[in-house]
Image (cartoon, rainbow, N blue to C red):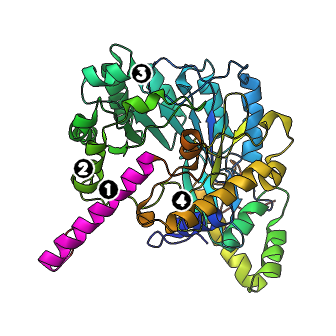
Amino acid sequence: MVIERFPRRHPDSAFRAIGDEGGMVVMPERAEVKVLNPVGIKIFALLDGEHSRDQIVEAVVAEFDVDAPQAAKELDVFLAELAAEGMLAQGETVSSEESP
Amino acid sequence: MSEGASVSPFQALSRSAFAKAIPLNCQIEITYRCNHLCTFCYNSPSGAREMTTEQIFEALRKIADFGVLYTTLTGGEALCHKDFFKIAAEVRRLGMALRIYSNGYLLADRKVVRRVRELNPLEIEISLHGARPESHDALTRIKGSFERTLKGVRNLVDAGLKVMLKTPITRLNQDELFEIRDIGESMGLRIAFDAVITPKDDGNLDPLALRANDEFIQKYWSEWYQELHRGQLPPKTNHCASDGEANCGTGRSGFTVDPYGDILPCVAFRRSAGNILAVDSLEQIWAKSPVLNEVRDLAVDARRKLDQHRDGSYFTFCLGVAEVQTGDPLGLYPQAELNAKAVRRHYELLEIGESKTGGKSA
């Protein structure tokens, strides 16, 4: 399973970090609110279509106690979860095809 | 990286946001226009020009940029705004969760409800003022409003939307509360009763003449509350308060924008902290406004003051009501004292019941 190189959150997703404790995201279309832990909200804020997957991994490694391979693995799982919940922009869904 | 559903990370984060005065909610009054004439309505239009639709869009962009997650559209009657659906769609386009406060009158039309459904609102709160036309219509002063409101509620429920009913308790409906509850439950709906009738925003005390009589209010809190609320205990704190040091969430958990664009600490405490159209961003006003800082301090002072009171642990106290009614935001107004005393009595009766039965009764 391969992730888009520059993943982008759904443009209708409002989100807010609450201190360093995590954050909340409004799920597009459903008007429900999802709670993310500190790593999750950090990543969500970086899903702006400008940060690459590798840059996001670097940012997570720099701030949290995790090594790069583990961070990359968890990022892929997280992005797949977001994609399944419609929280990534259209065209940014996780696919099994090779990315360009 | 999302939290499990069994714990309550949402509550934990909400409490943290409250403590840090990070606002998650905004209530925007898009117009004072209304198709009802409720005698106890707190709105006091000044006659100034209301924001245009474009200006409301500008306000919404600033609200979204500020990180607000939940926006409530209210009024007046929000659905009376000619561009209500454009405004509501903009709230959703900006990614905020949408709540709608309405009297339900225009929702008797299924076509309107279909358009509301397309907005995917989080919740719609509808005011129901009686269990029958005689009481409801007497309070709204619009003949036929009871039937139309109920039809509107049914339409919303049929459309699969989440609805909550709200009933301010007045002397005209005080004997119908159980029937009102039953109407709501027959449609699977939650209902919130409000025992405090507030003065008008301009200080006019006329609405208070409609409040339920003291004997009723005492019995409501001390004897009937649990039965009416299916076993739920009466609240000991304001619904907008967390467990923090502040009495309530005014200027802290959210804010209100009135139809002229003025930013208020909350819907009840109507001191303007500035105009949303006059600032580039809400960040600065939120952090530096003397009004907001004073209001936050007052909410802490109120909690400390109530803690000194005999019934202090049982108060639901509104600084805005206190200011309008007594001239002092920390002034204890009669309704709050009466309510606290009766709630205390409820808990005392509960303890007597428990000691007699040797266990918890609720």
Dot 3: what SS? Answer: helix
Residue at numbered disc 4: B241
Residue at numbered disc 3: B105
User: Mark 4 belongs to which subunit?
Assistant: B
The residue lying toward the viewer, choosing from B133 and A58, is B133
Q: Look at the numbered discs 1 and 2 and tell me whether their residues touch, using CB distance below 8 Å.
A: yes
User: What's under tag 2, amino acid-wise?
Assistant: Lys
Indicate the quadrant where residue B242 lies: bottom right
Name which residue lies at 42% across and 26% down. B104
Q: Look at the numbered discs 3 and 2 and tell me whether their residues touch, using CB distance below 8 Å.
A: no
The answer as to whether the residues below labels 1 and 3 share one chain is yes
**Residue A99 to residue B195: above or below:** below
Q: Upstream in the sequence, badge 1 or badge 3?
A: 3
Q: Residue furthest toward the left? A: B357
Q: Whole-Å distance between the Cαs marked 1 and 2?
A: 7 Å
Magenta run includes residue B84: no
Of circles 4 and 1, the one toward us is: 1
The residue lying toward the viewer, choosing from B361 and B55, is B361
User: Mark 3 belongs to which subunit?
Assistant: B
Q: Whole-Å distance between the Cαs marked 4 and 2?
A: 25 Å
Indicate the quadrant where residue A69 lies: bottom right
Residues in magenta?
Answer: B334-359
User: What's under tag 4, amino acid-wise?
Assistant: Ala
Left or right of B256 on screen, residue B182: left
Dot 1: what SS? Answer: helix
Residue at numbered disc 2: B219
Classify the position of the N terminus of chain B by image quarter: bottom right
Tell me residue B356's x, y (percent): 13, 76
Tell me residue A34's x, y (percent): 57, 60
